[in-house]
Each structure stands twice: as structure tokens, then as C-alpha cells.
Image (spheres, rainbow, N blue to C red):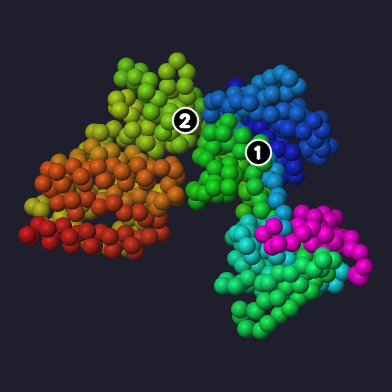
């Protein structure tokens, strides 16, 4: 059994720190590195512990299973190495691409990328006069990453406070979303670092034949013209995933962001989670919190606990009925969490299942059932919301995503909101579980109107649940029109969890529409 075994993919301080933290909790740690000669003396403080294993020169070739039991196959020294672990941590280093071309500058003694600065805290070696003024260019052409902004401010603060070198930061959108970056910017300003922010203009940048750089611009705050001739210009860099990190995402089945980092742009995943339970990401450039290694370690410990709690116990996960399954593999294709395994027939890995209901809603043979989400359960919820009194107000069934509209609905109800309607809020684990039959059931059981309220675009925990719900609402709307019903009785909206005021407006307007329709 995998028990509490963790595999960390990476060879950098972040990966080592995670290995240390997990080892001290008693977890078995396997560190798999691509290089043949990693800095093994810095891998772990717990040297000589049987809980530590380092696989040098190992590249992941395949990954099967899921949280609690990942079967990993590595290519190593012309052969294969097999390991079974409970969780996986991706802590691969990013790649940095200097932005010389963005600014029309050529490398030289007076121009260096951020990673070209000494990492020992000393000043960079200069020829000629001593270093008195350094200008940092951050995000003036392309969007800057918070990690880059933080490194620029820390370098400027160090030069300014420790070496008495005047530093100027020219930036467009200063990324201070990470924990501590806003405080860092204030500390740098207090130390004397000058900040110039550009929103509508860009500095003019010229470099002479000897490599010296001159910057000319108008300060948007004061309207004054400035001309700078710094001794050194430090350029920001573009962060990109390594080709191996991209390959890891493909092998493990992870969503990626537009750049290719193995963590999709999804608010539900920050800071260290992925679309697969039991797989945590903590590469250096993905950390936007105070300490990405600590956050990743905490996420791993939570995953280990989740795997242990589901092992051998009763499961509420989706189940595939063998007698109805025709092996069409629809469930395998649509599951956003990779919880469907392909053995002799498709099966569900209970610990990896998030009970989103997308597989059950998409299954053409209705071969998938989820305890608590059966048709009879839904019909009971719809019936329970109807008033036994003679109907004087419209009856509205509101299907709400549990992570967004459901939270907003609870907040609105707690404030005593009234909508001149009987509103039955039915929470679903994900809007992707709402089928056309679900919506039509609401109407067949007496609803005057139905609302389908989902997460905003690209903020669905299940990646595509909101889009699937929108498609199904459109299908039902077309059907209602063909049957001669008023399509205004069915409405689709997106909401965030903190939008109870907007929900109040939606329900009030929808109730008014239904009353107006009834009086025609």
C-alpha cells in the first residue's frame, strides 16, 4: 500500500524544503530528479533516514491510479523504476527568458536580466565608474509575474539599504498579489527606492553604441519630464514552464494555464492544488503566497488525510453499474478530476471522485449513480419546496452550485430577503450535474419558473460544469419554445459566492416577470 508515501518531482530549494517538512511529519518521501548529480547534501536535513529515497536521473514515463495509490513508472539508466505513492508533488523549476528584445536592448555590462544579479547579495561587477544608480524595468511591455515583481523589489531594497545605490523601478502593473508583496513595496519606498508607474505611456529607451542606456519619460502623477542615465539597467524576465513540467502535466492529466504551467487559472486551486486530488504543484514561479513550499506541504498532508479517511470505508462517490455500462468511455473523457480508471471496464476511484455529477449527467446509458443525487432524491427536493397552501405566489426552483450561488443564496436568506415568490433553493455539487430532465422535472412538478445559477466562466471547480449547464439550459429553452411555452420561465445566470445582492436582484426581477406572465 502507498500509505503515507509522497513523491516529489523536482530538484531545487522549494522541493528540498517540502521534503524536509514532510519527513518531519513521518511521511515517506521519494525525491525524483532528472539530473544525474543533484545537490544531495541539501536534499534533506533528515539524513540517513529510511523515509528518504532519492532517484537521480529519473524521468516520469507514466502515471496510473489516483490519490492514495498512484502507480508511477520512471525511465532511469535505460530501464524502468516503479513506485507506488499516495500523493505527488510537482516542484519543477521554471525557465526564465530575459526580455532584452521587448525593450530593444542588447546584453552588456550596463544591461543585465534579473537572474544575472549575484545571488550572494553583492553588487554586480562593473567596469569603469562605481555603481551609483540602478534602474529596474518591470512589466512595461508584457505582463509581469508576482514572483518577478517580488524579486525586483527585494533586489532594489537590498541595493538601496545595504549598498547605498539609488534604485528606480519603472513598472506598468506592479504585481503585488502575493502575500507580503504589498508590504515589501512600502518598505522599498521607505528605504528610498523610487517607483514610476505607467498606465497610458511607455518610457523611451535608447542604447548607444557603447551599451549605455538612457530613459526618458513623463511622470504620469506629476506631469514632470524625467531623463535617466543609470549605470545599470536590470530587465524583468518572462517565466515559462520547463518542457519537462509540461510533459508531467500531460502524463498525470493536469489542467494548465495559458502559459503552460501545470495549474489552471482557477480560483478554487490556489495556491497549491490541481484538478487531481492528491497532486500538488509548488514550482518556484507558481508560488503566490508567503511560502509556496509550506503551502504545498500543508496541501499534501491534507491529501494524505483525505486518502486515509476514504480507504476501506463507505464511499459516497459515483458508481458505474456494470450491467448498463456499454464502455463508451464518455465518463473517462469528461471527468475533470481523472477519477475514472480504465481496467477491464471503466471504474471510479472513490478517493479521487469529487461527486460533481458531470459523468452521471453525460452518461448516455444512465449507468452512473451517485448516492444522494438520484432522480428520486431530486424529485423529493422539488416537491418539498412547494407550499401546501393555495398558490398565490410564483413557485421558483433555483438550481444553485454549492460553491457559488448556493453560498450567496444562504447569505440572502439569512438577511431575511423576500422575493414575492416561493423560492426553493436546490444546491447541487456542480452545475454540470443539472440535466435537461432535472429542469423539466421542476416544471412538471409545478414550478412556475426555474433558475440555473452557476459559477462565473473559468471559475468552475469542475472546469466545465458551468459551460455544460449553459448548453443544457439552451436545449431546454428551445424545447419549451417548440412546445409553446414561454422561454422566459427558464433563466441562466452566473454568480460568485459573495454576490447575494445580485442574487436578490435576479430573484426579484424573475418573480416580477413570472407574475406579469401569469396575468396576461
On whether residue 510 falls in the magenta region, the answer is no
Q: Position of residue 93 (x, y in %)?
A: 70, 43
Residue 504 in the figure: left or right of residue 107: left
Report if residue 24 is visible in the image: no
The residue range painted magenta reads 101-130
Residue 399, numbered circle: none
User: Which one is nearer the viewer's eye here, 352 or 473?
Assistant: 473
Task: State which quarter of the image contains the N terminus.
Answer: top right
Residue 50 sits above or below residue 302 on the image:
above
Q: Is the magenta stretch mostly helix, strand or loop?
A: loop
User: Which one is nearer the viewer's eye here, 383 or 465?
Assistant: 465
Q: Position of residue 34 (x, y in %)?
A: 73, 32
- Mark pair 1, 2: CA separation: 26 Å
Residue 435 in the figure: left or right of residue 137: left
Say which element carries label 2: loop
Task: State which quarter of the image contains the C terminus.
Answer: bottom left
Say which element carries label 1: helix
On whether residue 119 falls in the magenta region, the answer is yes
Q: Position of residue 357 (x, y in %)?
A: 36, 36
Residue 277 in the figure: left or right of residue 2: left
Query: What is the total number of numbered labels drawn onto the structure image?
Result: 2
Residue 339, numbered circle: 2
Badge nearest the viewer, 1 or 2: 1
Residue name at image x 58 percent, y 36 percent: 249
Dots 1, 2 in contact, CB < 8 A:
no
Q: Where is residue 146 in the image (x, y as percent from the top left)?
A: 63, 58
Report if residue 62 is visible in the image: yes
Hey, which quadrant is residue 318 in on the image?
A: top left
Hey, which quadrant is residue 175 in on the image?
A: bottom right
Residue 242 in the figure: left or right of residue 390: right
* Residue matched to label 1: 243
Residue name at image x 63 percent, y 71 percent: 202
Amino acid at each position: 500500500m502507498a500509505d503515507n508515501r509522497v513523491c516529489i518531482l523536482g530538484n531545487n530549494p522549494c522541493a528540498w524544503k517540502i521534503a524536509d517538512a514532510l519527513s518531519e511529519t513521518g511521511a515517506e518521501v521519494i525525491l525524483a530528479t532528472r539530473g544525474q548529480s543533484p545537490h544531495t547534501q541539501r536534499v534533506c536535513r533528515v539524513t540517513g533516514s529510511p523515509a528518504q529515497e532519492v532517484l537521480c536521473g529519473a524521468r516520469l514515463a507514466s502515471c496510473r491510479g489516483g490519490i492514495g495509490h498512484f502507480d508511477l513508472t520512471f525511465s532511469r539508466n535505460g530501464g524502468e523504476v516503479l513506485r507506488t505513492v499516495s500523493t505527488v508533488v510537482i516542484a519543477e523549476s521554471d525557465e526564465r527568458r530575459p526580455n532584452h528584445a521587448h525593450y530593444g536592448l542588447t546584453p552588456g555590462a550596463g544591461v543585465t536580466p534579473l537572474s544575472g544579479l549575484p545571488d550572494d547579495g553583492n553588487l554586480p561587477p562593473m567596469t569603469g565608474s562605481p555603481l551609483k544608480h540602478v534602474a529596474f524595468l518591470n512589466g512595461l511591455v508584457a505582463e509581469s509575474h508576482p514572483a518577478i515583481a517580488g524579486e525586483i523589489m527585494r533586489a532594489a531594497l537590498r541595493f538601496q539599504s545595504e549598498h547605498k545605490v539609488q534604485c528606480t523601478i519603472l513598472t506598468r502593473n506592479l504585481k503585488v498579489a502575493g502575500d507580503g508583496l504589498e508590504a515589501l513595496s512600502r518598505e522599498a519606498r521607505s528605504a528610498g527606492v523610487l517607483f514610476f508607474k505607467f498606465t497610458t505611456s511607455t518610457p523611451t529607451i535608447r542604447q548607444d553604441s557603447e551599451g549605455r542606456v538612457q530613459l526618458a519619460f513623463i511622470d504620469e502623477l506629476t506631469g514632470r519630464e524625467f531623463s535617466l542615465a543609470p549605470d545599470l539597467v536590470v530587465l524583468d524576465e518572462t517565466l515559462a514552464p520547463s518542457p519537462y513540467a509540461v510533459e508531467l502535466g500531460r502524463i498525470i492529466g493536469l489542467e494548465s494555464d495559458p502559459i503552460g504551467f501545470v495549474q489552471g487559472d482557477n480560483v478554487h486551486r490556489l495556491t497549491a492544488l490541481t484538478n487531481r486530488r492528491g497532486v500538488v504543484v509548488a514550482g518556484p514561479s507558481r508560488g503566490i503566497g508567503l511560502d509556496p513550499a509550506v503551502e504545498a506541504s500543508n496541501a499534501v498532508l491534507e491529501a494524505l488525510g483525505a486518502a486515509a479517511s476514504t480507504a476501506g470505508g463507505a464511499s459516497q462517490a459515483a458508481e458505474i453499474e456494470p450491467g448498463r455500462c456499454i464502455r463508451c468511455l464518455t465518463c473517462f473523457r469528461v471527468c475533470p478530476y481523472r477519477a475514472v480508471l480504465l481496467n477491464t471496464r471503466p471504474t471510479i476511484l472513490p478517493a479521487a471522485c469529487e461527486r460533481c455529477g458531470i459523468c452521471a449527467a453525460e452518461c448516455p446509458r444512465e449507468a452512473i449513480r451517485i448516492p444522494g443525487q438520484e432522480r428520486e432524491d431530486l424529485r423529493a427536493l422539488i416537491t418539498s419546496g412547494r407550499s401546501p397552501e393555495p398558490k398565490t405566489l410564483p413557485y421558483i426552483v433555483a438550481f444553485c452550485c454549492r460553491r457559488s450561488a448556493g453560498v450567496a443564496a444562504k447569505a440572502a436568506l439569512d438577511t431575511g430577503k423576500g422575493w414575492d415568490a416561493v423560492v426553493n433553493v436546490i444546491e447541487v455539487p456542480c452545475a454540470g450535474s443539472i440535466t435537461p430532465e432535472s429542469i423539466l422535472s421542476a416544471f412538471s412538478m409545478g414550478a412556475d419558473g426555474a433558475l440555473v445559477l452557476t459559477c462565473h466562466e473559468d471559475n468552475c471547480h469542475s472546469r466545465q460544469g458551468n459551460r455544460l449547464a449553459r448548453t443544457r439550459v439552451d436545449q431546454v429553452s428551445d424545447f419549451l419554445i417548440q412546445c409553446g411555452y414561454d422561454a422566459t420561465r427558464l433563466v441562466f445566470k452566473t454568480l460568485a459566492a459573495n454576490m447575494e445582492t445580485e442574487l436578490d436582484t435576479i430573484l426579484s426581477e424573475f418573480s416580477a416577470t413570472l407574475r406579469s406572465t401569469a396575468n396576461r
